[in-house]
Image (cartoon, rainbow, N blue to C red):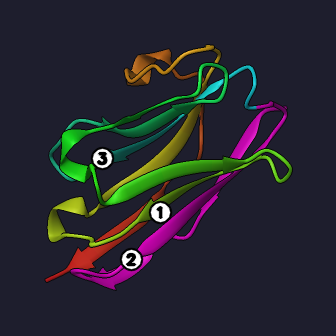
């Protein structure tokens, strides 16, 4: 059974850092694109960062470029999102997700499996 379990969210002051983790079971990153999405109150779910091990590409939404880094550890079957220089506008519920694709996809509807979400709150 495919399962994605997230951890690492919390409360942080502006300028601080958090590292989100998503432990995957029932799948391998060779066969899936892995994405981090977020949804803030009153806003649509948006792609934050996506990674495809198959083609070696990454995607970052413009607002997080230079601040966030996606990575994976195949031995641990875990994907990470390192978030630095956090801003209040980064406050959202963050989700990791897996899409059965061999390339980066950024649309949420392409993702079949989702984690439970973890709250990230950035105070000013």
Few, some or many C-alpha atoms within 10 Å of disc 3 (few <14, some 14-19, many ≥20)? Answer: some
Q: Secondary structure at mark 2?
A: loop
In the image, the segment drawn in magenta is 1-28
Q: Secondary structure at mark 1?
A: strand
119 drawn magenta: no
The residues tagged by marks 1 and 3 sit, at their Cα atoms, a distance apart of 17 Å
Circle 3 sits on which residue?
Answer: 39
The residues tagged by marks 1 and 2 sit, at their Cα atoms, a distance apart of 8 Å
Q: Quadrant of residue 68?
A: bottom left
Q: Give the residue drawn at x 80%, y 30%.
A: 27
Image position, residue 50 (x, y; %): 47, 34
Seen in the image, is 80 located left or right of residue 12?
right
Q: Secondary structure at mark 3?
A: strand
Circle 1 sits on which residue?
Answer: 82
Few, some or many C-alpha atoms within 10 Å of disc 2 (few <14, some 14-19, many ≥20)? Answer: some
In the image, 99 versus 59, the foreground residue is 59
Mark before the other along the chain sequence, 1 or 2: 2
| 90 lies above or below 75 | below
Circle 2 sits on which residue?
Answer: 17
The residues tagged by marks 3 and 2 sit, at their Cα atoms, a distance apart of 19 Å
Q: Give the residue drawn at x 27%, y 71%.
A: 86
Which of discs 3 and 2 lies nearer the camera? The answer is: 2
Q: Give the residue drawn at x 58%, y 27%.
A: 56
């Amino acid at each position: 059974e495919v399962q994605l379990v997230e951890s690492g969210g919390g409360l942080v002051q502006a300028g601080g850092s958090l590292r989100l983790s998503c432990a995957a079971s029932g799948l391998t990153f060779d066969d899936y694109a892995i994405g981090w999405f977020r949804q803030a109150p009153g806003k649509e779910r948006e792609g934050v960062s996506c990674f495809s091990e198959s083609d070696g590409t990454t995607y970052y939404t413009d607002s997080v470029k230079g601040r966030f880094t996606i990575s994976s550890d195949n031995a641990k079957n875990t994907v990470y999102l390192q978030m630095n220089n956090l801003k209040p506008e980064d406050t959202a519920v963050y989700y990791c997700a897996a899409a059965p694709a061999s390339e980066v996809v950024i649309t949420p509807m392409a993702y079949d499996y989702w984690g439970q979400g973890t709250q990230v709150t950035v105070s000013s």
